[in-house]
Amino acid sequence: MSAEGLSTKDLSFEALTRAAMGKPGMGSAVPGADDAETLAYKVSLRRAVWRRRVLPAIGIAALLFGWWAIVVGLNVKPFIAPSPILVLQTLFEKRSVLLSNLIPTALEAAGGFFLGNLVAILMATVFVHNKTLNDIFFPVALMLNSIPVVAKAPVLVLLMGNGVEPKIAIAALVCFFPSLVNMVRGLNSPNPQALELMRVLSASKTEVFFRLRLFSSLPYLFSALRISASMAVIGAVVGEWIGATVGIGALIIQATFNFDSALLYSAIVMSACLSGSFFLVVALVERAVVKWQPEQVH
C-alpha cells in the first residue's frame, strides 16, 4: 500500500516496527522447518529462564556461605559482624520492629519514585519539542545531579522541616536525572524513516508523539525506572539519616550507636529486599507494557 493511501489513524508503533522484528520460523520454504525452528526457540527460552532463576540463587547461596565461613573461621565477634544465622534469627525475632520501620521508608521511596519520574518525563517531553529550553535547563539539571545526595539532604531538611516531605524530595531528586536522560534519548530514538513517513502523512506533533515517539521511548524509560526503583530507597534512607525517628535509615543509625550489629544487618537486608521488590514490580510492568520487543535468548 502506498503512503498516499494511508492516514495517521492506520499507523501505530507496533505496525511500524512489526516488519523489522520477525519471528522464528516465518517465511521458511522447507517443509517442517517452521516446527523445528519454533521448538529450538522455545528450548532456548526455557534455558534462558532457567539461567535467570537458578544461577542468581547459586550466587546468593555462595555469598551467604562465604559470609558464614569468614565469620566462623576467623571467630569474628557478633558485635562486629554477625553470622547469617544470627541475622536470620534477628529478622524473625524483631520482625515487628523492622516492619514498622519499613513501611515509612517504603512510602517515602514510592512517593519520591513517582514524583521524580513524573517530573523527568514531563521535562523530557518539553526538551524534545523545544531545543532552546533543552540547551538552557539540561546543564542546570546536570549540575544539580552532580551534588552528592548527602549534601542535598540537609538543605532540603532545613527548607521543608523534619517530616516526610524532605525524604520524598530526596528520593525524587535521586530518581530524576537517570529518567530525564533516558527519556530524552528515547523520545529522540524513532527510526528516521518512520518519522519521515509520519511527515509525509501530514501528522501533527501530537500524533507523532503519541503514535511514535512515546512508544519508542518506553524501553529507554523502563531501563531508567529499574535504576530509579533501587535509587529511590537509597534516597529515602539517606533522608532518614539526616533527621527521623522512624524508618529503616533511623533504625540503622540507632543500631550503629547501640553496637547492635545483628539489627543493623537485618535493617540493611530489609532495605535491600525493598529495593528488590520495587525493581521486580517495574520489571513486571515492563513485561506487560513493552510487548513488541523480542525476548532475549542467551
Image: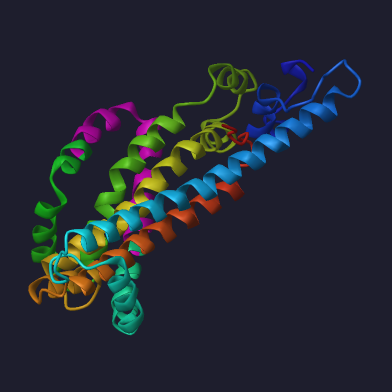
Q: Position of residue 28 (x, y in %)?
A: 83, 18
Q: Quadrant of residue 204?
A: top right
Q: Residue at the spot x=11%, y=64% of the render?
A: 159
Q: Is residue 205 magenta?
A: no
Which image quarter is the C terminus in?
A: top right
Vertical placement of 200 versus 57: above or below? above
Q: Residue at 26% across / 64% down in the picture? A: 268
Q: Position of residue 124 (x, y in %)?
A: 37, 38
Answer yes or no: is residue 12 visible: no
Q: Is residue 206 left or right of residue 72?
A: right
Q: Quadrant of residue 232?
A: bottom left
Region rendered in magenta: 111-140
The picture places residue 42, in percent across and down from the top left corner, at 72, 37
How is this picture coloured?
rainbow
Residue at the image position 43 percent from the left and 60 percent from the top: 277
Decide if residue 284 is in sight here: yes
Residue 117 painted magenta: yes
112 or 97, nearer to the observer: 97
Relative to 41, say whether 144 is above or below: below
Q: How many marks?
A: 0
Relative to 204, say whether 102 is above or below.
below
Q: Height in image: 284 above or below 17?
A: below
Q: Classify residue 34 as left or right of residue 81.
A: right
Q: At which x and y percent is residue 276?
A: 40, 57
Location of the N terminus by quadrant is: top right
Q: Main SS type for the magenta part?
A: helix
